[in-house]
Amino acid sequence: MKLTFLVTCFNQQEMISKTIDSLINQTQRNDYQILISDDMSTDNSFNYLVENYQNKYSNIKVISTTKKLMVGNNRNNLIENCDSDYAMFIDGDDVQSDKLVEKIFESIKTKKSVYHLKGFKELWDYDHIEVKYAKDYENVFLYVFQTKILKEMKFNTTLQIGEDFLFSIQYYELLNNQPGIIDYYYLLNRQSVNISLTKNGKLIDRLNLEKKLLEYLIPFEHTNPIVNGKINQKKIDIINFSILTKEPIVKIYISTKNIRIKHKISYFLYLTTKYTYTTYLYHKLLVKKIGFKI
């Protein structure tokens, strides 16, 4: 088998079918499989996936953890059960285009140890916003890994956020050559990311998790200057996020029950940290577009 899509799942019964369907309905339909690891979902996700996908498609396998693992360990579980030449992580709510497998197969003919997608498109569906970024070594979803090298790595199991950043940086360090480039942009459902983030006022929880990641990154140095720059930028982003949580807009975020407003504030905060705090005053102008005064 040439390729395996590694998909994590936890309580995603309502949305994961669109992701799996997109991976099934590819222009290139041979020589790849879909491996899904369910992390003890409480919404019947496992049974749903078995009945509607594993029992109907020979190239789909659904496995379940025996105890709650969290995302890092669940990805490690997928790696342990992967037996193809190459592997790629797909999030359980990210719907991909039908050209993904075709584009991957066109590239892996060169037999490099790792390949990198051209970048990703972030989809903010509530306002039909699409943000396109160039390749970024910190995002685990942008890699197509050679499985034998992938099995030498492990995701951090103590972090709830940023474990993919650490994994990608360490993986890049193992490479002896530049990754091959795949002519495809990963489609990232940023709205669903913010749904999970904004439920029950979890913005401050995220800040605490980001600070925990910062503790890992402060002593971390890398021999590659490009990767070291990414690490330093990540440190700055976390510090900026910490500053922004003290702004009045966050008080609005915490007090409102309107999920649409929460999404828009999350997008605003994301932009300000993405482009560093020096552009904060400029991005304050965005607030006018979402109906607030600061």
Image (cartoon, helix red, strand yellow):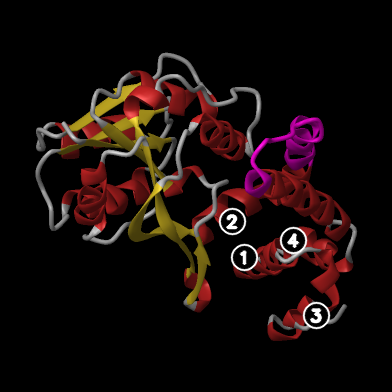
- Image disc number at residue 194: 2
Q: Please say if 125 is above or below 50.
A: below
Q: What range of the chain is rendered magenta?
A: 208-227
- The image position of residue 256, as x and y in percent, is 74, 65
- Judging by the rendered image, the residue that carries numbered circle 3 is 282
Q: What residue type is labelled 2?
A: Asn
Q: Mark 4: which secondary structure?
A: helix
- Judging by the rendered image, the residue that carries numbered circle 1 is 263
| Residue found 36% across the figure and 37% down from its top | 7
Q: Which amino acid does label 4 sit on?
A: Thr
- The image position of residue 242, as x and y in percent, is 84, 51
Q: In which quarter of the image is the N terminus?
A: top left
Going from N to C along the chain, the mark reached first, 3 or 1, is: 1
- The image position of residue 22, as x and y in percent, is 24, 54
| Residue found 57% across the figure and 46% down from its top | 138
Going from N to C along the chain, the mark reached first, 3 or 4, is: 4
